[in-house]
Image (spheres, rainbow, N blue to C red):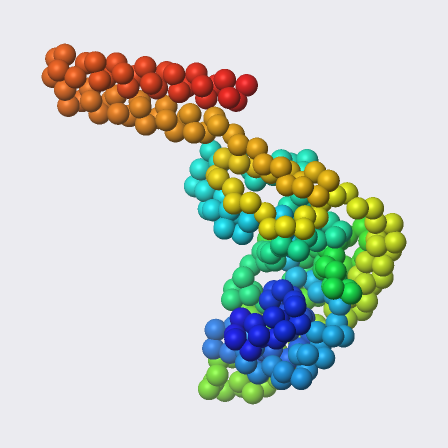
Amino acid sequence: MNNKLARIAQEYGLPEWWVEAIIIEYLDCRIFAGPEEVWEFRFDRIQEGLLRQALVKEKLVIHGSVLHNVDKNSLQARIISRLVSAVPKSIVSAQNEGDILAEGAVSAYHLSFLGNPKEVWDPKLNFSSHFQVLENGKLWQWKIAEFVTVKDRPYGKWVSDEIDLECLELVHTRLAQLRNAPVKPGRPGYDEFKQRVGEFYSWLEALRAPLREKLYQIHLLKLASYRDKGKTVPYDPPVLSQFEDFAVINGEIHTRFHAEPIFYRALVAHARRASQLSSISKGSERLDEIYQERVQAVINGAACLESFI
C-alpha cells in the first residue's frame, strides 16, 4: 500500500487491508487492457476525496477471510513449515477453528488472508467464503459460502444456503472471453478491446451491488441472534513456536506445547550421528561414542512415544 493510503488508514483508525478492500470493491483503481492482464491496479489514481467518502459510507466488503488471535509471523512460519514437513502441529485444533477464523465479532488483532494475492488476481473477480462488515468501529465476519467442485469441468463454483450465487457463473464465462483473446497495447483493435474490458467491469459492479445489499441484510439477521462465544481477545497474541497450538477460552488465549516433535528431531540427530561415527571409525576406536549416540536415540524415541501417548 502506498504512503498516502497508509496515512489515511492511520488517520481513520482503520486496518490498512480494509482501506485496500474498500478501494478494490468500490473505487476506480484499475487501468484496463494492460500489457500483462485485462486489469492492472493503479492505486495512485484514487482521488483522496472519493476514498474518504467511501470509507465513511461503505460498510461491507467481500475480501477473503479474516484470521484473528494469532501472531502474524508465527502463522507465516507455521504455513511454510507445513508445506515442507508434516511434523509441525496445526496451530489450532480442528474443533477450534473459530479461535483463528473469525465468525461474528473479530478481535482487534487480526489479519486479512486472500486466497490469491491481489498482484496475481483481482479479488473483485472472485467471491469468498466469508464477508466482512465494519460498523460503528466494530468489525464483523460471517461465513456465507463454500467453494465446491463441479463435475466435468476444470473449475468449481461458489454455493451458499443463504444467498443465490448462480449469477457468479456468468463472471467466469465473460472474463474467459476477454482473457483468452486479449489485444495488447499498440495492436490493431486495442481501443475497442479496452472498451470491452471497461464494460465488463461496469457489468460486474452491477452484478455485485445487489449481492452486497443482500449480504448486509444477512449481517443484520445474524447480528440480531449473535451470542458472544468468548472468541475475541483484547490483547496482542503471543509468539508461538512451531510445536505450539492455542485455544481461546472466555476471551483468553491458552497455549499448549507439544514436545514429541522435539524428541523426534533429537532421535533423528543422534541416529544420524551414530551412523556417521560408524562409517568413519575403525574397530573399537569410537565405539563408546557410537553406543552413546544410539542410547540417546532410543531414549528420545521413548520420550517421543510417551509424549504422544
Where is residue 170 shown, x and y percent of the image? 71, 65
Whether residue 295 is situated above or below residue 89 in the rendered picture: above
Where is residue 190 shown, x and y percent of the image? 53, 85
Q: Is residue 278 left or right of residue 203?
A: left
Whether residue 285 is situated above or below residue 138 in the rendered picture: above
Give the number of marks: 0
Residue farthest along the top direction in this orientation: 284
Task: Identify the residue at image location x=46%, y=21%.
Answer: 304
The quarter holding residue 126 reads bottom right
Out of 82 and 248, give the one closest to the viewer: 248
Whether residue 172 is situated above or below residue 281 in the rendered picture: below
Task: Identify the residue at image location x=46%, y=86%.
Answer: 186
Out of 79 and 224, give the one closest to the viewer: 224
Task: Identify the residue at image location x=56%, y=72%.
Answer: 6
The quarter holding residue 181 reads bottom right
Q: Is residue 75 left or right of residue 132?
A: left
Q: Quadrant of the C terminus?
A: top right
Out of 182 and 116, give the one closest to the viewer: 116
Where is residue 255 shown, x and y percent of the image? 58, 36
Residue farthest along the front direction in this orientation: 235
Out of 55 and 160, give the one closest to the viewer: 55
Q: Would you say residue 207 is visible in this rendering?
A: no
Task: Identify the residue at image location x=59%, y=86%.
Answer: 192
Q: Would you say residue 10 is visible in this rendering?
A: yes
